[in-house]
Image (cartoon, rainbow, N blue to C red):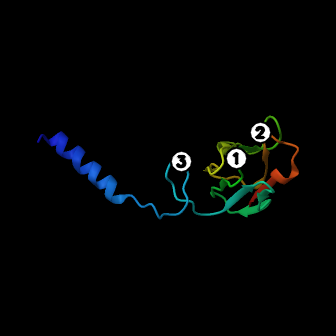
Amino acid sequence: MTARVAFAVILAATSLACGDSDSAPSNSGGTVTTGPTITITSSGVNPKNLTVSPGTQVTFINSDNRPHFMASDPHPTHEDCPELNSVGPLNPGQQRQTGNLNTVRRCGFHDHDNPTNTGLQGSIVIQ
């Protein structure tokens, strides 16, 4: 067996051994959710208002049975808090984090596809 093949076999075996189907919920990238979260349901977002420290990332979790597209205010330009725009479209069951919220300010957010639904609007205060 060549060194390259042996390395591939060891790498594959290590990857299988590290798998854990009982881990905490994760996004499609396999990252475990920790820290502050905002959950999207058929009733809206919860919590609607969240306060975090500078440098924090917030995870949005879509627990609704329909897709949502979370973005920064104002609609449709989404320019107030670009770090929120990394959440973007979320299919049911998906989750995604904001960028690092470094600037002390209030960041409003909404569902881009349903911008007038106040249940899908909220804010993150960085202080």
Q: Which mark is residue 28?
A: 3
The C terminus lies in quadrant: bottom right
Residue 120's spot in the image, x, y percent?
81, 51
Q: Are marks 1 and 2 in contact (CB under 8 Å)?
A: yes
Please tell me which of labels 3 and 1 falls first in the chain.
3
Vertical position of residue 52 compared to residue 6: above or below: below
Residue at label 1?
Answer: 84
Q: Residue at x 55, y 59 (%)?
A: 25
Which of the two residues, 109 or 24, is positioned nearer the viewer here? 24
- Picture residue at 76% right of the left edge, 39% below the top: 79
| Image x and y of residue 23, in percent | 48, 63
Q: Position of residue 114 (x, y in %)?
A: 82, 42
Which is more toward the observer, 30 or 66?
66
Choose the circle earlier in sequence order: 2 or 3. Answer: 3
Q: Does residue 20 show up?
A: yes
Q: Secondary structure at mark 2?
A: loop
Three-letter residue code for mark 3: Ser
Label number found at residue 78: 2
Q: Residue at x 83, y 38 (%)?
A: 75
Mark 1: few/some/many CA within 10 Å (<14, 14-19, 20+): many
The residue lying furthest to the top in this view is 77
Picture coordinates of residue 68 (x, y %)? 73, 44
Q: CA distance from mark 2 to mark 3?
A: 24 Å
Label 2 crowd (10 A; few <14 / some 14-19 / many >=20):
some
Closest to the observer: 96 or 24? 24
